[in-house]
Image: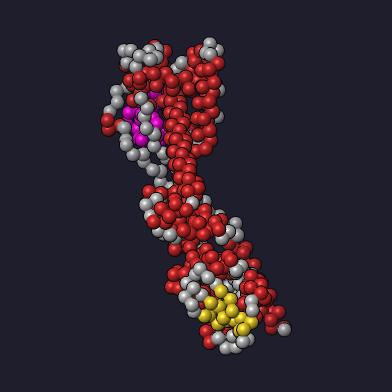
Amino acid sequence: MFWTFDCSILISSFYLQLYRRYSGKFYLMASPAIDSAWLSSPSEPFCKSLNVGEAHPADILPVLEAPVPFASDNSNAPQPPPLPSKNCTRTKFSKRPLEYIVVPKETKDAWDNLFKEGYGADVCILTNEKSCVLAHSNVLSIASPVLANVLRLSKVKNGMRYIKIPGVPHGAVCMFIRFLYSSCYEEEELQKFVLHLLVLSHFYSIPSLKRVCICSLEQGWLTRENVIDVLQLARNCDAPRLAFICVRMVVKNFQSISLTEGWRAMRRANPALEQELVESVVEADTRKQERQRKMEEKKVYLQLHEAMEALLHICKDGCRTIGPRDKVLKGSQGACNFPACKGLETLVRHFSNCKTRVPGGCVHCKRMWQLLELHSRMCNEPDSCKVPLCRHFKEKMQQQSKKDETKWKVLVSKVIAAKNAVGSFSSRSKGLF
């Protein structure tokens, strides 16, 4: 006891020194920059406020240069303390679900042999093939309450009770009774009789066998040929998850499944189910189109948000060969960090040189007018804003009809929602919208 006490003191003091030595050391990691791409969309005060220089093809870089992340110098980093030895580690026990209990192999083999040999059997189960499966009434009664009631009502002849399990093959009956004894089964036989076993497990109330059948079907035994049969059995056998998986498979592969023999048989026997599946396919296709439409709308709103940031960038700071007249432009500067700047620069150049330049007279100029009006509706500082015609559009809002005003408000709200969903692309534009 005295030696153990001294060892614990030494170990505690050792780790205390390590803690004092290595505490307080922290390392920082730079977060990667976020880049994205934008597709370009197609008044004298506007031209006077911007300095539009000549563009050089070499100045517009197609690919933005990725910033080099900061790397910390770990050359002087101290070595961590050694891991505890294997003798000090705690033994790890595997965690099993509570409903599963480990049964020795010998016990399973004993129950399996009791069924196969039929020693002391007092029940004869008759199948469709005029064959007999021997079993024990006590085992069947304990395993299934339905079988217990059937055995109670059966007649005894020469010390043997006779019952029937019709409608399924003899092999499926043998596998079913064997499972009641030892919960054992062969994988190949299960795959062969899985649909029959699903019906038997539901009819005779064997939840464990029902779970095995459902799990096997869900994990790869569903095919395009048997999915309709499995769907009908799943609904009749109270397996909602399996039925849902079948419906999802039918919706995904409707063209090929509708040509199978199972579909034709279902159409003759259960036309209501066919109508329900067709409606599910139509509904799924409608939802898919709606999702695609919303995704395209979000892309458009995100492009508009990026255009607003690029417009502020050009009118406030300038970019390469275009910018405010009070700024000195540097055409040879590096790539622009605003993804929409290149497309907007092309649009501004066209707008400044276009001879028509009236709303509705030129498609590209019309887009530029719309971008300028959208900015004015999102800008909260019109007096100090450097974007041309910002105050002009602010005054024009008061003369618009309620219908146009409602449309613009909806557009602004969706652009702001796209901005909030993706986040700010530039720290310099924070607080402007």
Q: Is residue 187 above or below residue 282?
A: below
Q: What residue is at 45 percent from the left and 73 percent from the top? A: 189
Q: Is residue 103 above or below residue 52?
A: below
Q: What residue is at 32 percent from the left and 35 percent from the top? A: 61
In the foreground, 47 or 17: 47
- What secondary structure do most residues of the magenta stretch adopt? loop
How many numbered marks does the figure carry? 0
In the foreground, 228 or 323: 228
In the foreground, 183 or 169: 169
The x and y percentages for residue 134 are: 55, 82
The span picked out in magenta is 318-343
Q: Tell me, yes or no, if residue 2 can be seen here.
A: yes
Q: Is residue 351 above or below residue 433?
A: above
Residue 293 part of the magenta segment: no
The x and y percentages for residue 190 are: 47, 71
Which of the image's four quarters has the N terminus?
A: bottom right
In the foreground, 340 or 142: 142
Q: What residue is at 45 percent from the left and 57 percent from the top? A: 227
Q: What is the basis of the colouring in this image?
A: secondary structure
Q: What residue is at 39 percent from the left and 30 percent from the top? A: 341
Q: Residue lying farthest left?
A: 57
Residue 342 part of the magenta segment: yes
Q: Residue lying farthest bottom?
A: 119
The x and y percentages for residue 355 are: 31, 12
Quarter residue 146 falls in = bottom right
Q: Tell me, yes or no, if residue 11 can be seen here.
A: no
